[in-house]
Amino acid sequence: MAVPRALDSFVDDPARAALFVDFDGSLAPIVLDPAAARPLPAARAALARLVPLLDRVAVVSGRPASFLYEVLPIDGLGHVGTYGLERIVDGVVVLDERVRPYVGAVARAADEAEAALRGLRVERKGDVAVTVHWREQPDRGDDAIRWAAEAAPRLGLEAPLRGRMAVELRPPVPVDKGTTVAELARGMRAAAFAGDDAGDLPAFAALRALADDGVLGHAVSIGVRSDESPPAVHAADVVVEGPAGLAALLDALADAISGSTTARG
C-alpha cells in the first residue's frame, strides 16, 4: 500500500510527528459486547512499529484507560480514555481532577440505568462515566435516550450521544477528543488523528484549527469508513476501509518511515 501524500510530513520528519487513533471501529471491529472488542493483530503490530519511529503515538478513545492499557500493552504507547478524562501514567489510571466531585453521581446513574433499562447493556466506565448501549436491541434506543435526558440533569451530569447506538452519562467537564488531541499535539510539526464516528470529528476539527493558527505545521484527518460512519468521516484527508484498511495504512507508514530513515543514514 502506498502512503498518501498527505502523510509526507510524517515520513520526512517523524521525530516531530504525532499520531492519535480511536479504538472502536478504527483499531477494532465493532462488536455487540463492548467488553469483547479487541484490536486487529495487524493494527496492534503496526502501532508497535510506529511508537519508536514517531515522537508521540496514543490511542484516544471513549473506552476506559484501563481497558486500552489491557488490550494494547505496547511500551511507549499513550492510553487516553473516556475522551480524555483519564489516562495511564506509569501504569496507573490518573483521573482529571475535575471529575472527582461527580464520582458518586456517576455510580448512581449506573445503578439507575440498570434498574430502569433492564435488558439493555449498561457499561460502567470506572468512576468516570456510564454508557447505555442498544445495539443488541435497536428498537429500545428511544427508551434509553428518554431515560438519559431525564436522569442526567437530575444527577448533575451530561448525556451526550456517543456515536453508534449509545448514550453516555458523564461529568459536565469540557473535555472531548478535540480538546484532548489539541493538548497532545502541541509542539509537534505534524499530527494526525484516525477515527470512524461522530465522536472523532472534534479531533479532526481541533487539528485543523491548530494548523490554521500556525501552531501545527501539518494536520491530517484519517477517516475509517464503514456503513455507519457519518459523511464527514468519508470527507477526511485520507480515507481507509474499516480497521483492516487502517492497519494496512499504519503498516505502510511504518515501512515508509523506516525506509526513509535508512536512506538518510
Image: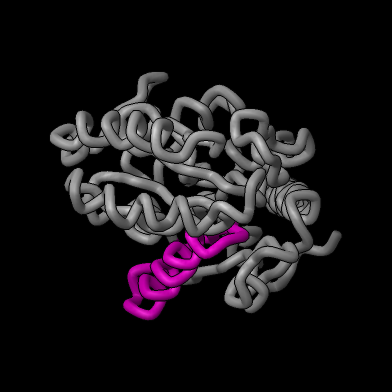
Quadrant in which the N terminus appears: bottom right
Frontmost residue, 33 versus 119:
119
What is the x, y in percent for residue 208? 44, 74
Position of 119 with respect to 258 (left or right) is left
Frontmost residue, 261 versus 142:
142
- Residue sticking out furthest to the right: 1
Position of 139 with respect to 105 (left or right) is right
What is the x, y in percent for residue 119? 56, 35
Q: Is residue 170 visible?
A: yes
Position of 105 with respect to 254 (left or right) is left
Q: How many marks?
A: 0
Looking at the image, which residue is at 36% across and 33% down?
110
Q: Which colour assignment does the render follow?
A: one colour
Q: Quadrant of residue 187?
A: bottom left
Looking at the image, which residue is at 53% across and 31% down?
68
**Residue 7 position (above or below residue 55):** below
**Residue 251 position (above or below residue 108):** below
**Residue 202 position (above or below residue 169):** below
Looking at the image, which residue is at 52% across and 42% down?
59
Frontmost residue, 190 versus 208:
208
Q: Is residue 93 magenta?
A: no
Looking at the image, which residue is at 40% across and 32% down?
115
Frontmost residue, 83 versus 188:
83
What is the x, y in percent for residue 212? 38, 80
Q: Quadrant of residue 125?
A: top left
- Residue sticking out furthest to the left: 101
Q: Is residue 190 magenta?
A: yes
Q: Magenta stretch? A: 189-216
What is the x, y in percent for residue 13? 56, 58
